[in-house]
Amino acid sequence: MKALLLAAVAAVILPAAAQARPVWTFDRDDAGHARLIFADPEDGGEGDPPMLTCTPRGQMTVLTYADGAHFPLHTASEQSQERLDRQGRPGPWPAQVRVSSGGVTAMAPGHAEYGGEMNDTSVVRGVLPLTSPVIRAFRTTGRLRLVAFGEDAGLTPVPQPLLRRFMAACR
């Protein structure tokens, strides 16, 4: 009887433990800009995962998302499928991403836009200079926290070899 009970418990626990978790990957976008993407390798590229992109002129764009249930910009116009904010304005809307690393925090100004009905999220982008103290701390710690509209992206640390490759490509 104990063996049957253990087998039943293992059948429930082991598949959950084997589920893929998001990991950091390095690549380049169509314009050749270096990117670090935090995504589940099994998702087939669906959605807008949190990502860091180095852009010309020494800037880094941080991209995260906010769940539609917590984001105030999802009131659809009755006349169309267009999404409006609480004041009735179409997007993109002004937004900020709070970026933290190693005890340093900065607000990355940017914008939010509706991410689509499939996942009912909004994509939030912010921009920081590569020379900002929070990006310098990130270079050292590999840890980054992105919060938009009260939602934490839940990032794990970037492995140091991958971080060094990304930061070298950002120069």
Image (cartoon, rainbow, N blue to C red):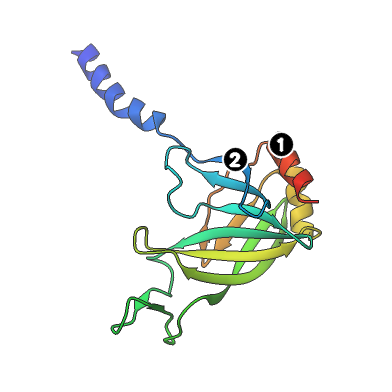
Element type at mark 2: strand
Total of numbered circles in the picture? 2
Of residues 156 and 85, the one nearer the viewer is 85
Q: Is residue 16 above or below residue 144?
A: above
Tell me which corner region of the image, top left, top right, bottom left or bottom right, holds residue 87. Answer: bottom left
Q: Quadrant of residue 88?
A: bottom left
Question: Mark 2 or mark 1: which comes first in sequence?
Answer: 2
| Picture quarter with the N terminus | top left
Front: mark 2 or 1: 2
- Residue at 42% across, 67% down: 70
Q: Residue at x 40, y 33 (%)?
A: 19
Task: Determine the secondary structure under disc 1.
Answer: helix
Mark number for residue 160?
1
Disc 1 residue type? Gln
Q: Is residue 34 left or right of residue 92?
A: right
For residue 130, side relative to residue 13 (left or right): right
Residue drawn at x 79%, y 58% as measured from the top left: 133
Residue 72's disc number: none
Q: Residue at x 54, y 58 (%)?
A: 64
The residue indicated by pointer 2 is: 25
Query: In the rendered view, would you say 47 is above or below 91?
Result: above
Q: Quadrant of residue 146?
A: bottom right
Residue density around tag 2, few if under 14, some if 14–19, many if 20 or more, within 10 Å:
some
Q: What amino acid type should be assigned to the residue bearing mark 2?
A: Thr
